[in-house]
Image (spheres, coloured by chain):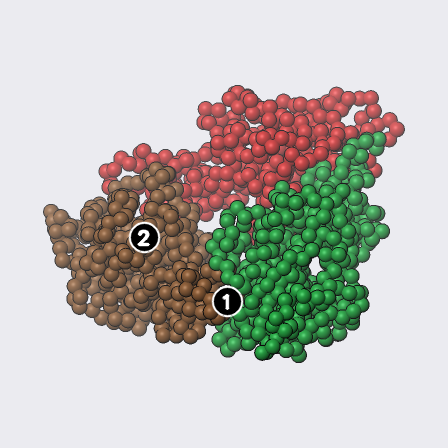
Chain colours: A green, B brown, C red
Amino acid sequence: MLTRDQNTLLVQTGPDTPMGRLFRRYWIPALLAEELPGPDCDPVRVKLLGEQLIAFRDSEGRIGLLDEFCSHRTASLYFGRNEECGLRCAYHGWKYDVEGNCVDMPSEPANSKFKSRIKQKAYPCVERGGVIWTYMGPPELKPEVPELEWAMLGDGQRFVSKRLQESNYLQAMEGGIDSSHVSFAHRFNLDDDPMHSGTEGNKYLKADTRPKFEVAESDGGLVIGARRNANDEEYYWRITQWIMPWYTIIPPFGTHNPLGGHAWVPIDDTTCWAWSINYHPTRELREDELAAMQNGDGIHSKYVPGTYRPLANKDNDYLMDREAQRQKKTFSGIEGISAQDFSLQESMGAICDRTKERLGTSDAGIILARRRLLAVLDDLEDESLPGLETEHQRVRSTSILLPKATPFKEGAGEALHMVEGEDFVSI
Amino acid sequence: MLTRDQNTLLVQTGPDTPMGRLFRRYWIPALLAEELPGPDCDPVRVKLLGEQLIAFRDSEGRIGLLDEFCSHRTASLYFGRNEECGLRCAYHGWKYDVEGNCVDMPSEPANSKFKSRIKQKAYPCVERGGVIWTYMGPPELKPEVPELEWAMLGDGQRFVSKRLQESNYLQAMEGGIDSSHVSFAHRFNLDDDPMHSGTEGNKYLKADTRPKFEVAESDGGLVIGARRNANDEEYYWRITQWIMPWYTIIPPFGTHNPLGGHAWVPIDDTTCWAWSINYHPTRELREDELAAMQNGDGIHSKYVPGTYRPLANKDNDYLMDREAQRQKKTFSGIEGISAQDFSLQESMGAICDRTKERLGTSDAGIILARRRLLAVLDDLEDESLPGLETEHQRVRSTSILLPKATPFKEGAGEALHMVEGEDFVSI
Amino acid sequence: MLTRDQNTLLVQTGPDTPMGRLFRRYWIPALLAEELPGPDCDPVRVKLLGEQLIAFRDSEGRIGLLDEFCSHRTASLYFGRNEECGLRCAYHGWKYDVEGNCVDMPSEPANSKFKSRIKQKAYPCVERGGVIWTYMGPPELKPEVPELEWAMLGDGQRFVSKRLQESNYLQAMEGGIDSSHVSFAHRFNLDDDPMHSGTEGNKYLKADTRPKFEVAESDGGLVIGARRNANDEEYYWRITQWIMPWYTIIPPFGTHNPLGGHAWVPIDDTTCWAWSINYHPTRELREDELAAMQNGDGIHSKYVPGTYRPLANKDNDYLMDREAQRQKKTFSGIEGISAQDFSLQESMGAICDRTKERLGTSDAGIILARRRLLAVLDDLEDESLPGLETEHQRVRSTSILLPKATPFKEGAGEALHMVEGEDFVSI
């Protein structure tokens, strides 16, 4: 349970908010690389942290991310012409390069110096891991480009999708931190999930619905251990990494299945992008795996055609099927791991009112993540922040059996760190 | 005409408003019984007086009406599993019984006492007269279950429907109190209305559009007499009962036709449920009558499929037919008694601005109903309130011819009281 | 760039705002004459300057424009019966004539004097030039009916349409004042526009995108000269008239093509009517011209059937065609002169935030129009205002070649004044 002020601090991410300033210290997943397929492709509207922007790739392939509205008369650059190394406003022809410089102003006298005084807001972008990232913070504090494991792999080893979530980012991210709901919301679907197949983890998940949580701070955020009974001597540990400000890594199910992870990125205060990534550090994804992911299975989604909005959404009650619920084909009546999560998260309202909740011991990860986010607000000006340095990002989640007496961080040891080219640890 | 403050007092019914507190002293029609057809049926979202709730019937057939949002993390219980005598949240499996007790908390340690400290908001419910009623007020002040005539009859003697009205409850209820509009809004349709057929009442209604109103306080609310000319010696009186807080009984048209009544129940401040009831105290409804009611005739409505929203609604201009209006098939161009009323009521705006109206003598019933509602706000803490006691509810409307010199209340006499098993009085 | 306060002053036009009071000093284009086709026709909802009104033509053909909501109980008169020289409310039968007098009150006693005390808000109307005009200001200050050239011509010499624009009126009107955008937004479509055909103007427009602006005050508003290079000795001048409060006249393209003009009339603060008029002072419009106009070509629009909303609108991204944009069939990807303008204007947001713009020398007309509107707010009570007198309205735009040394107003001379029955001046 939070005070109203604490909740407000956590959920608001616009330009002039504390959390908005914090998030602007990090690189932000902005678009799928495929949304800007090549030089001079169509400009794309992008909204991030409440700012309306326009993305384009110029004739040389450079990526621009500009204020959507032209400096001149505030017409949208969405209608602009992307040609000859710049985006030209369709109203009076002002043209900007990827850095926001006004490189042509054909409506003013040829000898005018006016254009040198115009600077369209522009954010630097890089492409890595199938994602176009941007940095919206103070230039002098720009950190290194993220080196999350999934972002550093070869293209064949990774599948990235994004999905519109019609709620604040925080309740979405809390779902990614929360290992406890898996035994319920996904209970009847663990066996058919492509990421879960053929492992003994499902067995423990279903048998013990009351995980005991232990949470430790990491350099980048939190390491969240959820302990379930396995046998007389051992516990089954599912250990989740939360990397500031919004990345979660799902504990694996066997080493033969791909890993999964998420990024939970605010569009504005009432919607967010749920980024979903499957990847395998030591092999390429198989065709059948890719086909399932492209089909929207597992943590990915089926879309309303032409959009990134899920086909099952609040306007159609997430295609609720009460009969399937009654027959224990699904726990909530909603089909698909992804929709099972976001239907419940969106049902809390656009912004969850955390003054009304009653948290238990199984919410330890969520409680500490909120606490850490709020605490970091005091260090907004620090050069280093949790999760900012690439070393903080080179971590792994794991699922292991440990003797009952062994503390989980000690027992997991190197399994929590990424080692390039080497496999991860999972039962 | 009201002051802005008076209007605000009357129209706002949320938990912390005076009128909201008053309404919470009464039993409230919450759902049609058919919406919860049997044990372990689908949970149903319910909104009443601004509160979002979830209704269900447990394995034993008991009715629960809980806060929609789980005490734990505020996910909607709409996605919950209704099984084994409780509703289980789909997120982390917390389970509530119909009284809001947390009877299972499988996400917490088996020996946790946490669940005994959790109480989901729950309102008591009863089923009577085809309606599920709830009581949302202070438990120690809970009154007896309503004994309105239509609620006490056998199932075959009654037909109940509900309809979404997209306006504040008050302008809807005022339509129910107002006998004067019948001569206009329904003018060309009185003869084909099933409740009106074969009576001389229509004749007087059309001949004298200028009823003279006399209004008297009753124990339960108001008795509103509308006097029209009949012949040299007599007046035709249509006498309407308004029973606090929101019931109206339509004066009858002959004793061979069913009676009609309404309840006008706030969903929130801009929408309400218009409950419509036909009933006959001394006989079962005929098949042809039931067929017409099910078809949405008379005071009932045709719906957008799968909803209780009328097919003729503000998004389609109530299926306005100007040609029918010109040809005097309908007075306003709208078809159907019910839609003729709510189209005009909704056209006042979501909340009627009563600072702008100019009331005449024909508005006496409305004026006094508002006055009485406002006056009762001073007695909010009283044990007894008008309309609260079952004796207040055992009343009837009537339509009679009275000698010109006879005062209407005196002339109507026992016709205004319900006598079980005996017929009502009407010409 | 404006201050926030200046922008607020300019964009708000409700009854109690300074600009709203200014606009109410002028006759206002309210409906197309065809919307009220004859005596006792269907009433039509009209919203102007934030006021909800109802228009009708009575049995004698007189035009009424009343407050939409009945004085009695605020039901909408849209459902009223238009018959026997008045509009009768469908709720209780109160009937109003075109002056707002309550001429019948059948719900009250026959001898009641109440109706004489009821006055429904009513605005005087006149029909001229295919348009029904209304005056919403103080009766004692009512000016003469407008004598804009297009309004005074015979029916065959004029084509008038209106179109819903989903933005504040000011950014729409600024588009009409702004001659500079023509070289860009319409660049690839000048030659196929019916108003532009067969003239040398297009050549200069495309060759010189950097017009130099000179602006002078006129009695009625502004005369805005946009100078482009023509040849060694001459400039090509396009001279636009802006007539207070919201009329613009497009400079002509040859004298064989019809002229064009607009009125930009606030519906409320976030929508406006864009009136578009083509006309020729000395000949009737040809059938092929009329066919093109009726088809929505040029400054006119294709509509969503049954509405005045453009078929290309913000809900369908204005039917953006990126391929046509790439192939230089259109500059912005949007088809049609009209949609090219309003797509950009609406893209600024419902109300353009003028604190963010950066104006250049080509925006001189817009800057001075705003300045003049703001300045006139100090003279709100004056009997005469710019554009109020018919003499102010009898002006013409022109497009001419002038020797480089000749000042444009001097060079244009009588070309800027309307002379009945004589042709206008244009190359």
**Residue ID for mark 2:** B23
The image shows residue C144, relative to residue C108, as above or below, that is: above
Q: Residue at x 71, y 34 (%)?
A: C358
Quadrant (top left/top right/bottom left/bottom right) for the C terminus of chain A = bottom right
Q: Could you say where residue B191 lies in the image, as x and y percent from the top left?
A: 29, 60
For mark 2, name the chain. Answer: B
| Residue at the right extreme, as displayed | C232
- Tag 1 and tag 2, C-beta contact below 8 Å: no
Nearer to us in this view, C425 or A360: A360
Q: Nearer the viewer, mark 1 or mark 2?
A: 1
Q: Please state if A164 lies on the left or on the right of B129 as rendered.
A: right
Q: Could you say where residue C174 lies in the image, as x and y percent from the top left?
A: 66, 35
The image shows residue B282, relative to residue B136, as above or below, that is: below
Q: Could you say where residue A178 lies in the image, as x and y percent from the top left?
A: 58, 63
Q: Which quadrant of the view contains residue A408?
A: bottom right
Q: Which residue is drawn at 69% across and 26% down?
A: C223
Characterize the local packing of mark 1: few (<14), some (14-19) or many (20 or more) Cα atoms within 10 angstroms.
Answer: many
| Residue at the front extreme, as displayed | A405
Same-chain check, marks 1 and 2: yes
Characterize the local packing of mark 2: few (<14), some (14-19) or many (20 or more) Cα atoms within 10 angstroms.
Answer: many
Q: Which residue is drawn at 45% across and 42% down?
A: C54
Q: Which quadrant of the view contains residue B137?
A: bottom left
Q: Could you say where residue B35 lies in the image, as x and y percent from the top left?
A: 39, 68
CA distance for labels 1 and 2: 39 Å
**Residue ID for mark 1:** B108
Residue C161 seen by the camera: no
The image shows residue A230, relative to residue C117, as above or below, that is: below
